[in-house]
Image (tube, rainbow, N blue to C red):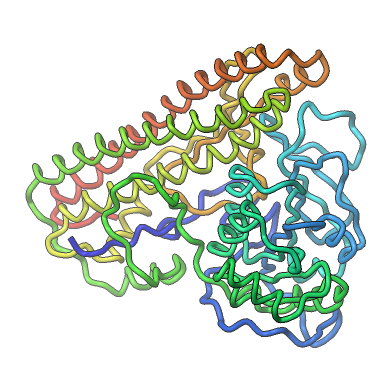
Amino acid sequence: MAPVVLSGKSVPAPPGGDGSAGDADGEDGPTGAPMNLPLNRPAPARAGSAVEPPPVRPTVVFAGTGQHEYAAGLLGAAVPESAPAAYVVFRHGPAGARAFIPGHREPRDIAAGTGPLTRPPRRVALSVPAPTLEYVHLIVAPAGTPGPARTTVLADAVRCADGLVYLLDAGEPLVGERRSELAALAAVAGRVVLVATRDAGPADRAAVEAQVPALATATWYHVDDAAAVAADLRSPQWLARPAIPAQRPASSGLRSAGTREGDASWAAEPARAEASASSRVSGDDVAWRQVLAERLSEHRTAVRDLFADDLDALVERCAVDPLRLPDTFDTELHALSLRASACLDMAARDLVAAVFSTVVEGRLRESDLVRVTTALWRRVEPDDRTLLVTATAGVAAVSGAADAVSATGLFSPSLLPQVSLAVSGNCHLSWHYRGVPDPAAAREWLYHAAGSVRDAVGVAIEDRFAALAEAVGALAGDAVDHGVLLA
């Protein structure tokens, strides 16, 4: 079979939510324009100069070491200390603050001081009348030691945004987890700016790039050169980025129908689809049904097994220090949901490509695949439920609250609804205000909670595959009956 693109840009972004297709809590978001390399240091620009605010504001993630203080200095607005584990989204506007709390359908207005929160928010959106924010939205990642779960969540934020500003001490060797984090972020970032927290000469920069070769094209600044960084943020370079990379786990175990270098952005596909002639459809109704049944069974088993293995590894990591529950468990669940959603999306795209390669005579063209995936995305019912782990180690489903589990408010396209997992507010209250159990009791609760998550997500996976099979079967059957792709 000819190579087929399985890109995360092959379907439009899901509607609704706090920001669609890349908007961070409001207006506009990342684009799919090609990236210009090499990256050059921009000429200084200031608000009110010839560099005017763009019609579409890019989104840039701040991470590394000391990013809270650095962002506060650039914007003249402090990052809230009451939510140290939250991603903070800065947008231009009158002063205001909202907290997005998993399990809540609406954000809490924390600027009005409406009382304590039931649990830590994953995202805080701040409106600040800072001149720099007329040009760019900023997302400040929470401080903390790099780890697998934190890196997964941060990489997803960077992948959906337009670029990354990373603060680091270039004079010190990168430890293993920091090096892994930088490599993961550089692999998905549209553009990378590195800010050295102390003087770094060419040898120091070369040492960093040798440890993470993907940083060779990064732009460097010194932490004291805040004016140059602010000018860079106002430059148009952040809007010149490639398409959002597909959510593809490094080791998924899923068989792919094939990939191709140079995947085009979604924005260019409608014109290609219209320009191409209709493909001829095979009249063989048996072949595609057999492929559908085989791929459905194969991918359902693979995704379920991969999720089970991932959950077991999560439990082992959390059980090392059970008294840090439920905070560490919530971060791990967030990362787990991102990985599970990525596996689901990859499996769904492979299944679709395999089935319609059988339906269409000859080679399945990219334009045909785009039309098919778009039609299927419209047929599959959305699922905005959030699965919340309760104080009793059960799982409760809350509808209409899926946006609150996002760390950034940015969403990349996916063929199937994403899986949303979090720890409930009553669970946090039980642990933090009613006394923490002993380590043995904490581990027992963790094992019971993991079992509940396994069952709940297993049902969600089955529901998504069932909806996909129904949609694919209907579309493929119509194509064979009518002799043309009705997508």
Dividing the picture into quadrants, the one containing residue 294 is top left
Q: Nearer the viewer, residue 231 or 186?
A: 186
Q: Is residue 263 left or right of residue 436?
A: left
Q: Is residue 263 left or right of residue 142?
A: left
Q: Residue at x 58, y 29 (%)?
A: 399
Q: Position of residue 244 (x, y in %)?
A: 51, 62
Q: Residue at x 81, y 83 (%)?
A: 45
Q: Is residue 478 left or right of residue 426?
A: left
Q: Position of residue 114 (x, y in %)?
A: 89, 32
Q: Position of residue 393 (x, y in %)?
A: 60, 16
Q: Position of residue 460 (x, y in %)?
A: 44, 29
Say if 456 sits above or below 301 in the image.
above
Q: Nearer the viewer, residue 51 or 188?
A: 188
Q: Nearer the viewer, residue 141 or 456?
A: 141
Dividing the picture into quadrants, the one containing residue 212 is bottom right
The total number of labels drawn is 0
Q: Quadrant of the C terminus?
A: bottom left
Say if 23 sits above or below 18 in the image.
below
Q: Is residue 249 left or right of residue 405?
A: left
Q: Quadrant of the N terminus?
A: bottom left
Dividing the picture into quadrants, the one containing residue 74 is bottom right
Q: Residue at x 84, y 59 (%)?
A: 93
